[in-house]
Image (spheres, rainbow, N blue to C red):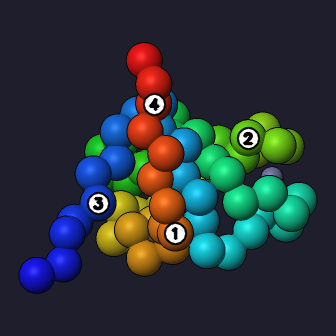
Amino acid sequence: MKTIPTINAGDTLELKKPHPCGNRLFRVSRVGSDIKIVCTLCGRALTLERVKLEKMIKNIIPSEN
Ligand SMILES: [Zn+2]
């Protein structure tokens, strides 16, 4: 049984595919049926469907706070 990843606002996601700026780390800004993530390097925001984003995640780094 595959574990469904839990994505929370404030978490940092490492994606399999890098952003055009070369960075792979994105901070989760808003979670709903769509998830808004912000590139930690260039600051651009992306909004993705949850199902699409889940397939792109390599690793989830939970928020410390
Ligand atoms: Zn970027």
Residue type at mark 2?
Thr
Residue type at mark 4?
Ser
Q: Which residue is mark 4?
A: 63
Q: Which residue is mark 1?
A: 58
Residue type at mark 1?
Lys
Quarter of the figure that contains the N terminus: bottom left
Q: CA distance from mark 3 to mark 1?
A: 11 Å
What is the number of callouts on the image?
4
Which residue lies at the image location 38% right of the left edge and 53% below the top edge? 34
Q: Which residue is mark 2?
A: 40
At which x and y percent is residue 45? 67, 44
Would residue 5 be visible to someone looking at this image? yes
- For residue 13, above or below residue 16: above
Q: Is residue 6 left or right of residue 48?
A: left
Q: Give the residue furthest to the right.
A: 21
Sequence-first tag of 4 and 2: 2
